[in-house]
Amino acid sequence: MIQTKTFQKKMKKKGLWQSVEPLIGQSSGADIPEKTFVELLDGTLSLKDRLAVMEELGCGKTNQEKHKAFYQKYADKTLKERVALMDEIDSPHKAPTVLHDDNTLSVFWSYGETDHFTCVCSCKMIQDIKKSDSLPESSTYCACCAGNIKALWQTALGVKLQLKKVVSSALISGGKKRCEFLFDVTV
């Protein structure tokens, strides 16, 4: 469930409240099931705003000590060098990362191998979807997971990231593609 009071505080803090206030108004202030919330987002907001809202909901933004330590150790390195060293972080949140020449960053985050990828998300909504026979068509779901990796990678790399696109998703592709999140990088 999306807890509307907590959600409202987060969205106001990020300057997104005006975009989502009409959606919350439709719920009469009651908590909203995630699936209903995503459908409302998809039906009313631009892609940029949907991604911004969902990445703010991303879980796992705590326990960044190892990522902070990594940045402190390599703060004198270039961004490209830090990206190349990221496997050194002793964390379950390891994800192959590529820094592109256009100052974007691809983060690949899923379990498995070719044609048998699995979503890493442990959110109850995603777990329920995994058990069902129908796969979601919307990448809006996956932006929440991107918010998780964004928080960790910003800390480790010492940059600001903005989710640009969910390029591919293990969840939506039924395991045929691994998750790839594309971020704009601001140094």
Image: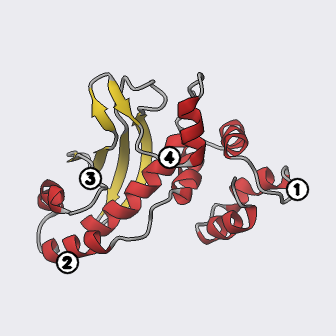
- Whole-angstrom CA distance, mark 3 to mark 2, is 18 Å
**Looking at the picture, how far across and down is residue 68, in whole percent?**
27, 74
**Tag 4 or tag 3, which sits nearer the N-term?**
3
Mark 2 — residue?
A: 72
Q: Between 169 and 15, which is closer to the camera in this rendering?
A: 169
**Tag 4 or tag 2, which sits nearer the N-term?**
2
**Tag 1 or tag 2, which sits nearer the N-term?**
1
Above or below, comparing residue 107 to residue 8 in the picture: above
Crowd class of label 2 (few under 14; some 14 to 19; many from 20; radius 10 Å):
some
Q: Between 85 and 115, which is closer to the camera in this rendering?
A: 115
**Element assignment for label 4:** helix
**Looking at the picture, how far across and down is residue 178, in whole percent?**
34, 33
- Whole-angstrom CA distance, mark 4 to mark 1, is 25 Å
Name the amino acid, label 3. Answer: Lys
Q: Is residue 121 left or right of residue 159?
A: right
Mark 3 — residue?
A: 94
Residue at the extreme front of the image, as rendered: 131
Crowd class of label 4 (few under 14; some 14 to 19; many from 20; radius 10 Å):
many
Name the amino acid, label 2. Answer: Gln
Q: Residue at x 20, y 63 (%)?
A: 89
- Whole-angstrom CA distance, mark 1 to mark 3, is 40 Å
- Whole-angstrom CA distance, mark 2 to mark 1, is 46 Å
Name the amino acid, label 1. Answer: Ser
Can residue 138 be seen at all in this image of the molecule? no
Mark 1 — residue?
A: 28
- Whole-angstrom CA distance, mark 2 to mark 4, is 28 Å
**Tag 1 or tag 4, which sits nearer the N-term?**
1
Crowd class of label 3 (few under 14; some 14 to 19; many from 20; radius 10 Å):
some
Mark 4 — residue?
A: 143
Q: Is the Cβ of the residue at disc 1 closer than 8 Å to that at disc 3?
A: no
Q: Between 22 and 152, which is closer to the camera in this rendering?
A: 152
